[in-house]
Image: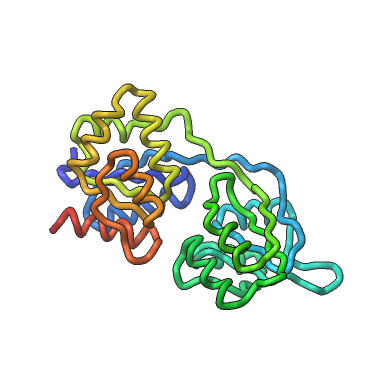
Amino acid sequence: MSDRPRVAVFRPDDERLTEAVETLGSLGVDAVADPMLAVEPTGTVPQAADWIVFTSKTGVELATQAGWSPANPDGHDPALACIGPATADAARTAGWTVDLVPSEYSSTGLVAAFDAVGVDGVGVEVARSDHGSEVLLDGLRDAGASVHETVLYELVRPPESGHSAEAAADGDLAGACFTSSLTVDHFLDAAADRGVREAAVAGLNDAVVGCIGHPTRETAEDHGVDVDVVPGEASFESLAAAVVAELND
């Protein structure tokens, strides 16, 4: 058995989890892969608008698989905004032109980017999961946009999730990488289902806990979880590096 530190990661069980495990391994720790999110498509596609906003690579891929394209038959194609480079890369792979990527990869960053562009009186379609932040919708409306939201997919907790919570409860985790508020909620729900919620929180508080952004940090702290690091860039690579650096400090 490896004597390297064990760090939990909660990404969906697809290439994101594979890449996260590889990233942690390259940093000298063993990943405890425990997916806390599974995607359930709703079958819907974005509605027509002046701007279309995608907040995840998953949303882009589901829209593409459904045969959707931003191109309009009349030639008046909408502008396209993506929350970060991974989402933008997926859109470009689909053959779409990306017009806006905020410098801060978050709902707050998108609002700031749209404030700079100006969306007063403009129609904005937000295509995302059922757990999107209200910050984006409220911010766009405050900027004068006419906003519509389409839920492309729901995020649910896999029924088999939770072995990382038991590891935390046993004091067997050196760190944890939370990539959204929902991963925090689902981790704690899984811990409760296994009867180890209090012990799991205590175990996390003895470990290095990293959160990908301040909303995720706030969720964790609201549940009594001490957060040690929030990287400057909202990417898993930065999160993993920050957690491991704190472990090695």
Q: In the rendered view, does 132 fall on the left or right side of 233?
A: right
Residue sitting farthest toward the right:
74
Horizontal side of residue 154 vs 198, given as left or right: right
| Picture coordinates of residue 181, whole percent (x, y) | 42, 46
Q: Quadrant of the C terminus?
A: bottom left
Q: Nearer the viewer, residue 114 or 35?
A: 114
Q: How is the image coloured?
A: rainbow
Q: Quadrant of residue 63?
A: bottom right
Up-down: is 113 above or below 153? below
* Total number of numbered discs in the rendering: 0
Q: Quadrant of residue 245?
A: bottom left
What percent of the width, then of the height, locates residue 28? 22, 54
Identify the residue at image location x=72%, y=47%. Answer: 44
Expressed as whole percent of the image width and height from the top left, the position of residue 97 reads 65, 73
Where's residue 241, x and y in %? 27, 60
Looking at the rendered image, the quarter that the N terminus falls into is top left
Residue extending farthest top: 195
Q: Name which residue lies at 76% across and 61% down.
A: 48
196 with respect to 207 (left or right): right
Front residue of 112 and 79 = 112
Q: Quadrant of residue 130?
A: top right
* Residue shown at the point (22%, 40%) measured from the top left: 173
Q: Work out whether 75 lies above or below 48.
A: below
Q: Is residue 85 above or below residue 201?
A: below
- Compared with 180, 55 (above or below) is below
- Image point (19%, 46%), residue name: 5
